[in-house]
Image (cartoon, grey):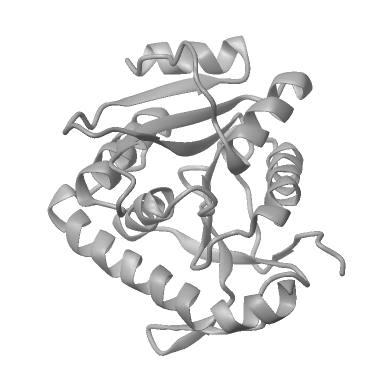
Amino acid sequence: MNSKITVRELKPINIEGGYLIDGLPSVGLTSAIATQSMIHTTQFDMVGVLDSERFPPVSIIHDESPNFPARIFVNNDLKVAVFSSFLMIEQSLHRDAAKMMLDWAKNHKCSLLVSSSPVKSENDNYSVMGIASTAEAKKKLKDAGIPIMGQGTIPGIPGLLLNEGSISHINVIVLLFSTSGKRPDFKSSAQLCMAMSKLVPGTACDITSLQQEAEKAEHEIKEADKETKLLKDTMYG
């Protein structure tokens, strides 16, 4: 079965010199929830979809409309794009997803790709750190006042983005947020969303409505994953 992820653009996109935010859930749901909240806070348009023969054949009904599970949102004025998904990305697709995003960012002449990954913590410290693929990206972290991680391991799509970005000289930043690992939570989502807004000018997080949006997004993602589990089990054997 072909595992290549394809991009179908439905509207004109002009984000030259701008930003791509990875909201595809590959290591937990917090990154997907934070980016969903950002999409709702800042004016984004749905401009494309992501598809693969290894995605479950399913339509996600949202606001009375059918949707592909994985979509692209763009604010052309801010020159910001967000890749978002209602479904967890299977591990077998992580390399394809990372390569697809790097190629897309390069083709659209983005200046920075921002991803995120959880760091397990048993206390209530919800600080955010970062790691960068290039010296230019590292400077962006320093200018934003975000501490830089010295040592550690970053799995999934974020780790692949860093590795490929470092050898291809593509600016990639992965934000590392604290979590108990038990479930996505409001504080982690809020901290991550605010850190992203420091790196991506013009984006914002409405903290007042973030908890409601986070709970709604978490429910939608979990329901979609639950409803497609039988399909995925059948497809992946």
| Residue 28 in the image, given as x and y percentages of width and height | 44, 51
Q: Residue furthest front?
A: 237
Residue 125 in sight here: yes
Q: Is residue 78 left or right of residue 186?
A: right
Q: Please, is residue 174 above or below residue 145 in the view?
A: below
Q: Is residue 91 left or right of residue 204?
A: right
Q: Indicate the quadrant where residue 118 lies.
A: top left
**Residue 180: quadrant of the picture:** top left
Q: Nearer the viewer, residue 201 or 169?
A: 169
Residue 158 placement: quadrant: top right
Residue ranking furthest to the right? 1
Q: Identify the residue shown where x is 54% and y is 26%.
A: 153
Left or right: residue 152 compared with residue 94: left
Q: Is residue 221 above or below residue 117?
A: below
- In depth, the one of 120 and 214 nearer the eye is 120
The image position of residue 191, as x and y in percent, is: 26, 37
Q: Residue at x 18, y 57 (%)?
A: 211
* Figure quadrant of the N terminus: bottom right
Question: Who's the residue at 29% across and 55% down the image?
Answer: 41
Residue 38's spot in the image, x, y percent?
35, 51
Q: Nearer the viewer, residue 76 or 134?
A: 134
Query: Can the viewer see residue 80?
Result: no
Callout count = 0
Residue ranking furthest to the bottom: 64
Query: Which quadrant does the C terminus fall into?
Result: bottom right
236 to the left or right of 59: right
At x 50%, y 54%, the residue is: 25
Residue 33 placed where, x, y %?
Answer: 36, 56
